[in-house]
Image (cartoon, grey):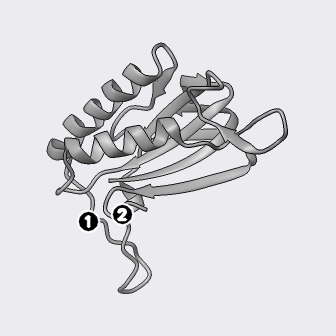
Amino acid sequence: MRLLIQRVSQASVAIHGVPHAAIGRGLLVFLGIMPEDSEEDISWLVQKLLQLRIFSDESGLMNRSIQEVKGELLLVSQFTLYASTKKGNRPGFAGAARPETAIPLYEKMIGRLEEGLPGRVQTGIFGADMQVALINDGPVTIGLDSRSRE
């Protein structure tokens, strides 16, 4: 399971040009799921994500987590995080989980995030053609992969 995390001052998702979800200060998180992923991957990533100290303290140092700053989170499914570009110029997506595997894990991820950030989690719609807008704060962009736990 992979996360691409962007610290934002605001972010939003529209579907077919219609606003669907929006947040203020917080994290825009893109989620990619592999067929082998499990609830163990979700647990590790959620704990790491909620405790990741990437918000500034009063000294301007990245010392605060999303929970500490009472930030919001926008979760967007993105199978392209598992794009393979080894052969040719057209990416392949065989490494991404099929919807019947990915959707239940995506929904479990949402539930776990809502437990840690009650009332502060927004989402896109799995599999929808979404337009994502954001103002990256910093910029700060960090990747997490449950297969390479650092």
Q: Please tell me which residue is depicted at 39% across the width and 72% down the height of the picture.
A: 91
**Residue at numbered disc 1:** 95
Q: Secondary structure at mark 1?
A: loop
Badge 1: few (under 14), some or many (20 or more) residues near its Cα, within 10 Å?
some
**Residue at numbered disc 2:** 82
Q: Secondary structure at mark 2?
A: helix
- At which x and y percent is residue 115? 37, 20
- List the single residue furthest toward the top: 119
Badge 2: few (under 14), some or many (20 or more) residues near its Cα, within 10 Å?
some
Query: What amino acid is labelled 2 in the image?
Result: Tyr
- At which x and y percent is residue 44? 33, 45
Q: Nearer the viewer, residue 123 or 38?
A: 38
Q: Is 51 positioned to the left or the right of 108 in the image?
A: right
Q: Please tell me which residue is depicted at 66% across the width and 25% down the height of the picture.
A: 69
Estimate the spatial distance between the alpha carbons at disc 2 and disc 1, rounded to whole Å. 6 Å
Vertical arrangement, residue 41 with respect to residue 65, above or below: below
